Image (cartoon, rainbow, N blue to C red):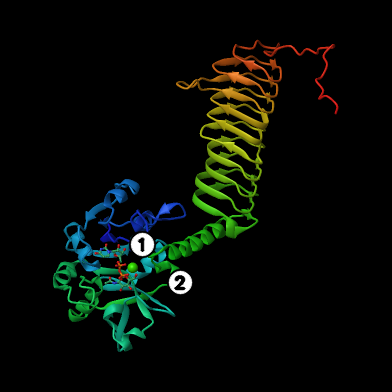
């Protein structure tokens, strides 16, 4: 069993986000910042992860619904030291505790492991050196040793010139925790219980403080406003693009790709500019995603082309299919190999067999379509009577004429054809042509009305 306990502080309000949502629920790469921090924490295989929540706790519990952490409430936000104290009843007297922050989303496990290794059973402190340290707690050293942290608001002019700052993340020996937390006072500029005062207390008790500087600032960067959220989103997306490129995916414009989930891919996948991938997206060998497509939970077979401006959600597509431009695939569209879906075609809860095509201006909802069938331009499955939905069943090698309305429930047999402009309300037999439109007539004796000449 690991002797590592992790406490994530996430009770703050995030006033400068100007939002109804608690700060830690704002997302990086489509995932709440707090969820990023919990995942990183869990990757260290700790004995336990506690999350201290306060502001908007109902929203936090609803959105980050996880049972792999212990939720601890801090009803009043009296400071970071007070927040850690709330978790004290859940921490054993032995082992050590790593403190993380719900609004510092991009810390990686390697950095934290470095901190844990440096600290051993003493105190470890994650630091950074900034050109502009304004706002941060400053690291105060004597003879090279870290002896205290002074908050910006409590710092004198000399201390404010220090560029070495406290990232907030630290690891503490549990044997010292309750004693130190008891000694904290709120006698400071902000009237808060500062976690950072533990550094001076460690010095008093002759427990060494081991500083570890982050390799890059983003690893410890916190989010206080939308500007900082956007900056970390950019860093995160650069990392996602980098890992796709490293794995052989061609990105024509890496800076405009947005990955908000998990991407699995084969070889020779190409993604054009402005693409959004959300949820779980699986791209087979040779899949090409055209510019400005949004793809949310989709499995796309090898060799399939998704042309520009297509929107795909909760669907699956076989191999060598052609989708778009301007296609809309909605939940439970299940398209077979070599299916073609063209511009302004919407497909929902519909199965299409191999090689079937709907190339223009069509709505296919709640339908089962066999293989090799062609759905003419402007076809509509009228699947909804205002109360219930019904299925349209279309066989193999069917030809549905242009501008056909298929009023479900209805079955069109194999190799049947429907005439253009038909409203089909009854089943269409196999091999036959079914028409339901009035016969075209021409009136030979008809005279077009003319305006009288002046
Ligand atoms: C803190 C550090 C500062 C460091 C900075 C890094 C202290 C006293 N100061 O300052 O040295 O440079 O972070 O960003 O620790 N929180 C609670 N409950 C509270 C107060 C805060 O859960 O009562 C949480 C917040 O949600 C946030 C984190 O703790 O995630 C930091 O709190 P914040 O008020 O932003 O601390 P800073 O003043 O930025
Ligand atoms: Ca802060």
Q: Mark 1 points at which residue?
A: 103
- Nearest-to-viewer mark from 2 and 1: 1
Split into 4 quadrants, where in the image is the N terminus? bottom left
Between the C-alphas of marks 2 and 1, the distance is 17 Å
Mark 1 neighbour density, 10 Å: few (under 14) some (14–19) many (20 or more): many
Task: Specify the quarter for ligand 1.
Answer: bottom left
Residue 414 screen position, x and y as percent: 66, 15
Residue 292 screen position, x and y as percent: 61, 49
Confirm whether residue 112 shows in the render.
Answer: yes
Residue 133 screen position, x and y as percent: 39, 78
Q: How many labels does the image show?
A: 2
* Residue 115, picture quadrant: bottom left
* Residue 337, picture quadrant: top right
Q: Residue 216 carries which label?
A: 2
Q: Viewed as shown, does residue 213 lie left or right of 320?
A: left
- Which circle's residue, 2 or 1, is located before the other in the chain? 1
């Amino acid at each position: 069993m690991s002797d590592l306990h992790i406490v994530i502080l996430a009770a703050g309000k995030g006033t400068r986000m100007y939002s109804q949502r608690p700060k830690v629920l704002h997302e990086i790469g489509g995932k709440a910042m707090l969820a990023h921090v919990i995942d990183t924490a869990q990757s260290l295989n700790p004995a336990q992860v506690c999350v201290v929540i306060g502001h908007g706790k109902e929203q936090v519990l609803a959105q980050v619904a996880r049972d792999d952490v212990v939720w601890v409430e801090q009803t009043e936000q009296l400071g970071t030291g007070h927040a850690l104290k709330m978790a004290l009843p859940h921490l054993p007297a032995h082992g050590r505790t790593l403190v993380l922050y719900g609004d510092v989303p991009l810390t990686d496990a390697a950095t934290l492991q470095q901190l844990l290794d440096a600290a051993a059973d003493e105190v470890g402190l994650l630091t950074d050196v900034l050109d502009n340290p304004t706002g941060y707690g400053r690291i105060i050293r004597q003879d090279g040793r870290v002896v205290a942290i002074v908050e910006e608001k409590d710092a004198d002019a000399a201390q404010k010139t220090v560029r070495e700052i406290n990232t907030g993340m630290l690891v503490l020996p549990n044997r010292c925790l309750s004693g130190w937390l008891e000694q904290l006072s709120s006698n400071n500029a902000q009237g808060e219980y500062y976690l950072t005062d533990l550094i001076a207390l460690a010095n008093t008790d002759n427990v060494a403080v081991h500083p570890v500087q982050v390799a890059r600032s983003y690893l410890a960067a916190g989010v206080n406003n939308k500007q900082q959220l956007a900056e970390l989103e950019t860093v995160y997306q650069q990392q996602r693009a980098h890992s796709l490129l490293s794995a052989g995916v061609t990105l024509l414009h890496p800076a405009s790709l947005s990955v908000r989930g998990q991407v699995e891919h084969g070889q020779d996948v190409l993604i054009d500019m402005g693409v959004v991938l959300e949820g779980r997206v699986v791209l087979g060998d040779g899949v090409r995603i055209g510019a400005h497509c949004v793809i949310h939970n989709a499995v796309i077979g090898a060799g399939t082309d998704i042309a520009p401006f297509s929107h795909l959600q909760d669907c699956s597509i076989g191999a060598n299919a052609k989708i778009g431009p301007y296609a809309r695939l909605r939940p439970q569209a299940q398209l077979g190999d070599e299916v073609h879906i063209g511009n302004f075609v919407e497909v929902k809860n519909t199965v299409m067999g191999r090689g079937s095509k709907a190339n223009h201006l069509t709505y296919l909802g709640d339908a089962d379509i066999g293989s090799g069938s062609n759905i003419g331009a402007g076809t509509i499955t009228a699947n909804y009577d205002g109360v219930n939905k019904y299925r349209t069943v279309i066989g193999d090698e069917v030809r549905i004429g242009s501008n056909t309305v298929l009023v479900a429930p209805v079955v069109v047999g194999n190799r049947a054809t429907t005439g253009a402009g038909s409203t089909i309300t009854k089943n269409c037999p196999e091999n036959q042509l079914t028409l339901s439109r009035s016969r075209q007539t021409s009136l030979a004796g008809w005279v077009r009305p003319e305006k009288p000449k002046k």
